[in-house]
Amino acid sequence: MGRNAKLKKAFEHIKRDFAAAIADVDYPVQVTFFDAAAPELKAEWMADFKQSFPNVRILSSIIGPVVGVHVGQGCIALIWSKDIQGFA
């Protein structure tokens, strides 16, 4: 299995897990995507999430050098939490 196929499979797994994790929440959610020198891939993933999860606020950041030296170039990560800006 090539790198692109592995990335696609991993991304689909992440989307399924995320959908299951937020299925029963009763609060607004935000997701932050992080990349280690992979802005194009991060942009693709963010665009897909925006389409797949239109009610979720999508944010972007980077993996800095301290963590980046351990995870390596090309790493993509995401975290999700309550969207405190979504509370009225």
Image (cartoon, rainbow, N blue to C red):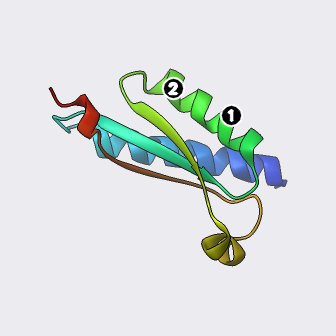
- Amino acid carrying mark 1 in the image: Glu
Q: Position of residue 61 (x, y in %)?
A: 57, 49
Vertical placement of 1 versus 68: above or below? above
Reading the image, the residue beneath label 1 is 44
| Label at residue 75 | none
Reading the image, the residue beneath label 2 is 50
Q: Quadrant of residue 62?
A: bottom right
Residue in the picture at 51% in, 26% down: 50
The one nearer the camera, 14 or 82, is 82
The one nearer the camera, 86 or 3, is 86
Vertical placement of 82 versus 58: above or below? below
Vertical placement of 23 versus 67: above or below? above
Residue in the picture at 66% in, 42% down: 42
Residue in the picture at 81% in, 54% down: 3
Q: Position of residue 69 (x, y in %)?
A: 71, 76
Q: Quadrant of residue 11?
A: top right
The one nearer the camera, 16 or 40, is 40
Q: Residues within 10 Å of mark 2 (few under 14, many from 20)?
A: some
Task: Report whether 14 appears left or right of 27.
Answer: right
Do labels 1 and 2 touch, CB within 8 Å? no
